[in-house]
Image (cartoon, helix red, strand yellow):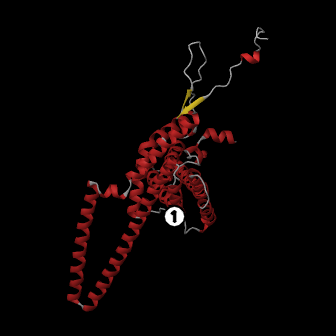
Amino acid sequence: MSNSPTTKTERRARPRAFRLEGDETVPSKPASASGAELIEAETDAFAREAAELVDGLTGDEAAVEAAQANGLLQNFVMSWGGVFVSAITGLFSLALSIWAWNFVADLFSHSAILGAIGLFLAGAAALAAGVFILREIRSILRQNQIARLHVALAEAHAANNQKAARARVAELTRLYAARPESARARALMKDYSSQIIDGRDLIDLAERHLIAPLDETARKEIAAAAKRVSVVTAISPRAILDVLFVAGQAIVLMRRIADIYGGRPGLFGFFKLARSVGAHLAITGAVAVGDTLLQQVLGHGLASRVSAKLGEGVLNGLLTARVGLSAMAVCRPTPFIAEKAPGVGDVAPFLFSGKNKTSS
C-alpha cells in the first residue's frame, strides 16, 4: 500500500495553524525552502472603512464644522472686528444715555408733567432695549449650542462612545421638548437610551426619528423659495426688483430653516447665521453651483435658449436652493450620517429640464 500512487484527496493542502498579530496573519512556522505556499494577509475593506470613519471627517462634514466654527460668538468677540463693534456700540449707548438724561432733565425744568412723561417713556424704551438684548443673547447662545451639539454628535459617532452618545442624544431631545409634534420621537429616544444600544446606532436612531421630519420640512421650504424666485425673476420687468426679491427670499429662507431646527435668530443672530452660511458657500457652494450650471443649464437645459429671462429665473432659483442647503447644513444639530445630504436636484427638481422630460 505504501507504493500505491497518491490520490487527489491526499494531495490536497492540509489545514495549517496561524497566529494573529493585530491585522496581520503570521504562520506558526517559517516557510520552508521547498516552496511551501504562504498565505498573505488580505486587506479588510470593512476595517479600512471603519478606520476612515473614526480617524477623519468627510469633506462635507469638515466644511460644515468649519462654517459653524466661523460663526461662533466667541470667535467673533475675541477678534479685532468684535472689539471694534463692541467699542462703537458702547460709545453709542453712552452717548444715547447722556442725551436721554439731559432731555428728561430739560423736560423737568419746563414742566413736572412733561418730565414725568419723558421719564416714563425713557424707562419703557430702556426696558424694551433690555428685553431685546436678552432675546438676542438667548438666540445666539441657542445657535452656539446647536453648533457645539453638531460637533459633539459627530465626535461621539466617530469614536462609537456610548456614554457620550447618550448624553448628547439627551441634550438633542431636550432641544425639542417644547414641540408637541416631536413627543412620540422623544419618547422613543428616551426608551432607546435606556437600552443597551451601540453609540453609533443610538445617534443614527436620533437622526432618523428626531431630525429626519425636520429635514423634510426644510426641503419643502427650500423648494418653495426656489420656485418663487425662479417664477418672479422670469416675469420681473426690472433687474433691481430681481436682486431685491432674491435677497429678501434668501433672508427669509435662512431664518425659516434656522427656526425649523430650533435656532431661530434675532437681528444680531441673523448676522451670525449669515456669516456661517457664507462660509459654507465659500467652501463648498461655488463648486456645487458650478457643477449644476454646467451639467444642467448649459448641458441639458433649454431655458436659456428659449428666453433670457427664463434662464435667469432658473439661475436665481439654483442659487436660492444652494443658500437654503447651506443654511440647512449649518443649522442642523446632527451631521448627515444615517440620512443622505440632499442636493439641488433633490429639493428643486423642477429647475432641471432633463428631469422634467423624464418625468413627463
Closer-to-camera residue (3/169): 3
| Relative image position of residue 186 (x, y in whole percent) | 60, 64
**Badge 1 element:** helix
| Residue appearing at x 58%, y 37% in the figure | 46
| Residue appearing at x 61%, y 66% in the figure | 183
Closer-to-camera residue (140/308): 140
Farthest-out residue, front: 2
| Residue appearing at x 28%, y 91% in the figure | 113
Closer-to-camera residue (117/333): 333
| Residue 168 higher or lower than 133, as above or below | above
Q: Can residue 161 be seen here? A: yes
| Relative image position of residue 214 (x, y in whole percent) | 57, 58
| Relative image position of residue 349 (x, y in whole percent) | 60, 45
| Relative image position of residue 151 (x, y in whole percent) | 46, 52
- Residue 111 placement, left or right of 184: left
Q: Residue 194 falls in which quadrant of the image? A: bottom right
Which quarter of the figure is the N terminus placed in? top right
Closer-to-camera residue (324/353): 324
The amino acid type found where label 1 is placed reads Leu
Q: Can residue 248 be seen here? A: no
Q: Residue 49 falls in which quadrant of the image? A: top right
| Residue 58 higher or lower than 130, as above or below | above
Q: Residue 218 falls in which quadrant of the image? A: bottom right
Q: Within 10 angstroms of label 1, few (less than 14), some, or many (20 or more) residues?
A: some
Give the total number of marks visible in the rendering.
1
| Residue 132 higher or lower than 315, as above or below | below
Which quarter of the figure is the C terminus placed in? top right
**Label 1, on which residue?**
175
Farthest-out residue, top: 3
